[in-house]
Amino acid sequence: MFAASSKRPVLTLRIAHRLSELAEIIDASAHDVLLESPVSAQPGQVAELLCEVGFPSEPKTYTGVVHWVQQERTVNRIAVALPHLAPPDVLIKASGSIRESLRFNCSIPVMVSWKNNSLRGRVLNYSRAGFCLTAEGAIPNDQEFTVTWTRNSDQVKMKISAASRWATPGEGLPIAGCNMVKGPLYCFSHVDVDRWLHAAVNRPHIGLPGSPAMAASTLMTTRLFTTYRR
């Protein structure tokens, strides 16, 4: 049985018509909510976050999409991307301050190129519009470059423009912190999160985009209902 920490805000997490389960808010930023729960989830599944907002409180529903899942022995960590700013109540309860974005671990082989340079590298983590990577050679600070890779879930060839902002020696190979210059949001997720977010903002009543991963997610909707541990 999932034992929630008394120090963290608690949600009730329900997927489709399954029984409800507790979930904790681990962290939150302007457009991300990170949860911990025994509930199974996959990138591309739709998430609805129901919060009690205002005073007197009233329920509000915020819809997002799962873009990252880390499976552990008894619980899962689930990251939900939101098309609009996260609910203030969630931000305050989670960390007490608004962070621009959270970072999520990954391990994705890529090619980095600029001018006459081409390096093999690996993305170590990503955020809404940034990432850290390690490469065979150093990338100068403020250097703009191109990153290419193949997304494993659907074998789509990906390409973005980015710029390095800082660098550290790392353990063996240098590590660079980068911002995306041109490309989709959450581009290193296993699904096309950016496409879903744009559809949610511009066509909220039409539903999910037509990619196979997104279309399948309509069969399993994640609902988050706020509860309060006393």
Image: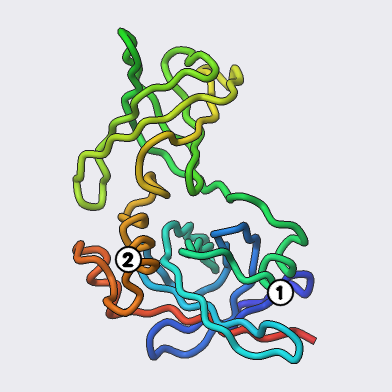
Q: Nearer the viewer, residue 130 or 173?
A: 130
Which quadrant is the C terminus positioned in? bottom right
Residue 218 occupies quadrant: bottom left
Tell me residue 109's x, y (percent). Answer: 34, 32
To which residue does mark 2 refer? Answer: 199
- Judged from the image, the secondary structure of the residue bearing numbered disc 1 is loop
Q: Is residue 127 visible?
A: yes
- Above or below, 84 against 135 in this view is below
- How many marks are shown on the rendered structure? 2
Circle 2 sits in a helix, a strand or a loop, which is it?
Answer: helix
- Residue drawn at point x = 35 percent, y = 67 percent: 202
Q: Amino acid at mark 2?
A: Ala
In the rendered image, the vertical position of residue 137 relative to residue 12, given as above or below: above
Q: Residues within 10 Å of mark 2 (few under 14, many from 20)?
A: some
**Residue in the picture at 49% in, 13% down:** 138
Of all residues, the one furthest to the top in this rendering is 116
Residue 194 drawn at (x, y percent): 36, 55
Numbered tag placed on residue 9 in the rendering: 1
Q: Nearer the viewer, residue 57 or 17?
A: 57
* Colouring scheme applied when the structure was drawn: rainbow
- Residue 136's place in the image compared with 223, above or below, is above
Rendering quarter of residue 229: bottom right
Placement of 107 over or under 13, stated as above or below: above
The image quarter in which residue 171 lies: top right
Residue at x 38% of width, y 62% of height: 197
* Disc 2 to disc 1, C-alpha distance: 30 Å
